[in-house]
Amino acid sequence: MIAAKVEQVAELRSLAEKASAAMSQTPPSGTPNVNRMEDIIVKMVDLQAEVQTDVDRLLVLKRNITDAINHVQDTNHKMVLELRYLNYKPWKAVAAIMRYNISHVYALHVAALSAIEVPSENAHIYLPSKA
C-alpha cells in the first residue's frame, strides 16, 4: 500500500510539473487554471501525509512482530518467522535459505506460529492462520 501511495505522489508531482510548464507558456491574454496547480499540490501533500501515517503504523507493527518473534525459543522457528515476516521472503526462498524442503518449512511455520505469544496490549496484531 505504501509503495502504491508513493507512486501516486510521484505521478502527482509529475502532473504538477506539467501543469506549471503549461501555465508558464500560457499567453498573458489567456486564463490559466491556477486552481488546478493548487489542487494537485493539496492532493500531493495529503497523500504524503497518508504515506507517513502508513509508514509509522508499519514501523509499530513491525516492532510488535519482532518482539513476538524474539520471544520464540526454538532457533528454527525463529528463523522461519524472521525470514517470512520480517524479510518478506517467499516460501521457496525460506526453504532454500534454511536448506529444508518446502513441506518441512511449512511444518516449522505451523509449529512456530503456535509458539507465538501475543501480549494482550498487542492482541490486535494479525497472525495468519496456522494452516
Image (cartoon, helix red, strand yellow):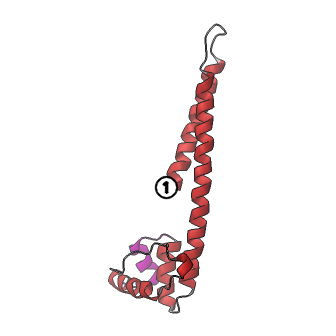
Residue at 63% across, 42% down? 45
Q: Which residues are magenta?
A: 88-101
> Which quadrant of the view contains residue 107?
bottom left
Is residue 58 or residue 10 the one in the foreground? Answer: 58
- Residue 86 lies, in percent from the top left, at 53, 73
Name the amino acid, label 1.
Answer: Met
Is residue 31 or residue 124 the one in the foreground? Answer: 124
View extreme (bottom): residue: 73
- Residue 102 lies, in percent from the top left, at 35, 80
Residue 90 in view, yes or no = yes
> Which quadrant of the view contains residue 20?
top right
View extreme (front): residue: 120
Residue at 56% across, 64% down? 58
Residue 99 in view, yes or no = no
Q: Which residue is mark 1?
A: 1
- Residue 106 lies, in percent from the top left, at 36, 82
* Residue 99 inside the magenta-drawn segment: yes
* Residue 83 inside the magenta-drawn segment: no
> Which quadrant of the view contains residue 42?
top right
Does residue 26 lie above or below 20 as drawn?
above
The C terminus: image quadrant: bottom left
Total numbered badges shown on the rendered structure: 1
Does residue 44 lie above or below 57 as drawn?
above
